[in-house]
Image (cartoon, grey):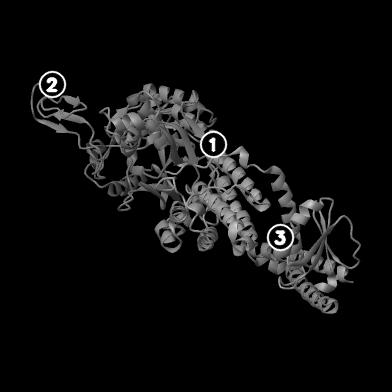
Amino acid sequence: MEYEDQAGHFWHVRYPIVGMEGQFIEIATTRPETMLGDTAVAVNPGDERYKHLVGKMLLLPLVNKEIPLIADEYVEQEFGTGCVKITPAHDPNDYEVGLRHSLPVINIMNEDGTINQNGGRYAGMDRYAARKAIVAELEAQGYLVRVEDYSHNVGCCYRCGTTVEPLISKQWFVKMEPLAKPAIEAVRSGETRFVPERFDKIYFHWMENIKDWCISRQLWWGHRIPAWYCQDCGEIVVDRQTPHACPKCGSARLEQDPDTLDTWFSSALWPFSTLGWPDETAELKYFYPTNTLVTAYDIIFFWVARMIFSGCEQMGKAPFDTVLIHGLVRDAQGRKMSKSLGNGIDPLEIIDQYGADTLRFALATGNSPGNDMRFSDEKVKASRNFANKIWNASRFLLMNLDESITEARLPAALETEDKWVVSLYNTLVREVTDNLERFELGIAVQKLYDFIWDILCDWYIELCKTRLAAGGETAKAAQQVLVYVLGNTLKLLHPFMPFITEEIWQSLPHAGEGPSIMVAKWPVYDEALSFAREEADFQKVMDIIRAIRNQRAEMNIPPAKKAKVYIETGELEVFRAGAPFLERLASAQSVEVGERFDLPGAVQVVTPAAKAFIPMDQLIDREKELARLQKEKEKCLSDIAFVERKLQNEAFVAKAPAQVVEAERKKIEVSRRHLAKLEESIAALG
């Protein structure tokens, strides 16, 4: 069934109180035809209006049968009249009320939607024709009080859209209490754990309040119910094997129940039935129980719980030790994807456009166990760009690779920059492995992204270009480091981007590591590759390079415009060793390192470990730069004034969409920050 809102009516009907002339109870119903099967009227036990009437008998209109007025917590006294007709055969909630009060269950409808013999003179009529006749007769006899319009949620057939009629019928059930106990214990004891742990509450709530499970379905496809009916004596035979004769009378005329098992019943057998069960196969012995089930939180009770209690019952142990719960993929606005909203995503289209690796990486980015994630084109494009970055870096390495390098092995001697990148890679191995073991996939992905993009591609490859161009042993050592770090980092990335990592790894030297990255040894943290001092020293050089770059960008100085850089620091050896990198990556004409400099008018750049001075007259024409900054300041002031007028306009703020107004507020904040920087630059030049 699928539920949809339908416009209907509330028919208010009087039920006379037996023995109280002229007194009535008023009920309201959306299906007046079902009153033919009413066996009680219920009120809330705390409803003062009806307390004195509970236990009285009512006369069921048209049927002229006495039914009791009962009290039950199910009734919401604020809804409608506070009186609810109880029809156990045609409403699941009414059925539960009927069980609590031992009410008769009277089915008044056939499976084709017509009234059956229990409907008296309405028998044979279609449900809607009967409704029309009943309403007319209620009105004629003075029982109908009024009719009001009412919109309500109605279950409909998902294939043809027909309104489905709730109807009691004989079904097969599984007794759940003995199955639930060992399944609850499996999670309580830690044999199976949920990640995140909070989701075990959903599991326990469902399992501890479980009811017997209806497992038969009136569907065309599925596993048939293993029940056979003897056509001669009526005996019912339930067996694992198809019986050939009735055990009671010996008749061979046995007919199997046409119903099928509930889909979730069949699905519950998945952990072991797929491995050859009930035979004791080698696959069953090896793979049961398995390690980790990955699934969404919305089917914990539909599937996870059923697999656990089926496994405990049939195999004597739970089917998996860990249940990793992931969230739902929502659209960029955080809405659930649906046909009605038209915001669904076809993964095959995304794969055709961007590739499977890109889609996988985008979905893992920002992912945390149990939490929903938002899908956006921007995330996919960012992942595509990341894949391109890896591809281009790999091509650069292969274009500069010495044929004598056949395996991923570090050289005997490492330069400072080599120790820096190897030490960071070594830390990455430890942290990503730990993140994966903790199922922190989003954190692992972010660390891989940052290392590959920022450290390996943007820094180390740039640092190596001079060595690669020089040739000889220094170039070969850099190549060996690149092969080692890139090849092993691809292994860490492989679970998230299996195709591109396999393709690149196959092209890299990997002698002795097997035919595929899939079976290559997972990288292991090595204490001998931790160069803490060199890593910290080189980070100081990088910090000053980054700070100089940022300052030049703010002053719009092109990389080709070079100037001498003076480094004032107490760590002379560190920055003298880093001078070649400053010249190459900070556009320095030359570098002088000392403990103290007095350079009035020079641009100053400060980091925790050093202070850089860049003579202004070597970088810019002061007058031209002042004029440019002043012009940019005037434009910035004009933009701020324009947005301020908009936001001061009450009509605009009141009528414009909230996101538009918010965008204007953010725009003015950005402009004000830019203005402050411009004023700082003007003051520095003044």
Q: Position of residue 418 (x, y in %)?
A: 63, 51
Q: Residue at position x 25%, y 47% from top? A: 126
Cα separation between marks 2 and 1: 51 Å
Q: Is mark 1 on a helix, strand or loop?
A: loop
Type of the residue with mark 2: Pro
Which residue bears the numbered disc 3?
Answer: 581
- Look at the numbered discs 2 and 1 and tell me whether their residues touch, using CB distance below 8 Å: no
**For the residues marked 1 and 3, what is the alpha-carbon distance in whole angstroms?**
46 Å
Identify which residue, 282 or 252, lies in the foreground: 282
Secondary structure category for the residue under label 2? loop
**Label at residue 196:** 1
Mark 1 or mark 3, earlier in chain: 1
Q: Which of 228 and 57 is in front in this view?
A: 228
Of callouts 2 and 1, the N-terminal one = 1
Visible in this render: residue 325? yes
Q: Is residue 675 left or right of residue 422?
A: right
Crowd tier of the residue under label 2, counting other residues whose Cα lies within 10 Å: few below 14, some 14–19, many 20 or above: few
The answer to whether residue 578 is left or right of residue 392 is right
Residue 54 drawn above or below residue 144: above
- Which residue corresponds to the image point at 12% horizontal and 20% vertical from the top-left? 248
Query: Label 1 is placed on what type of residue?
Result: Pro
Question: Is 301 placed left or right of 478 in the picture?
Answer: left
User: What's the mark number on residue 247?
Assistant: 2
| 669 sits to left or right of 304 | right
Asked whether residue 148 appears in the rendered view, the answer is no
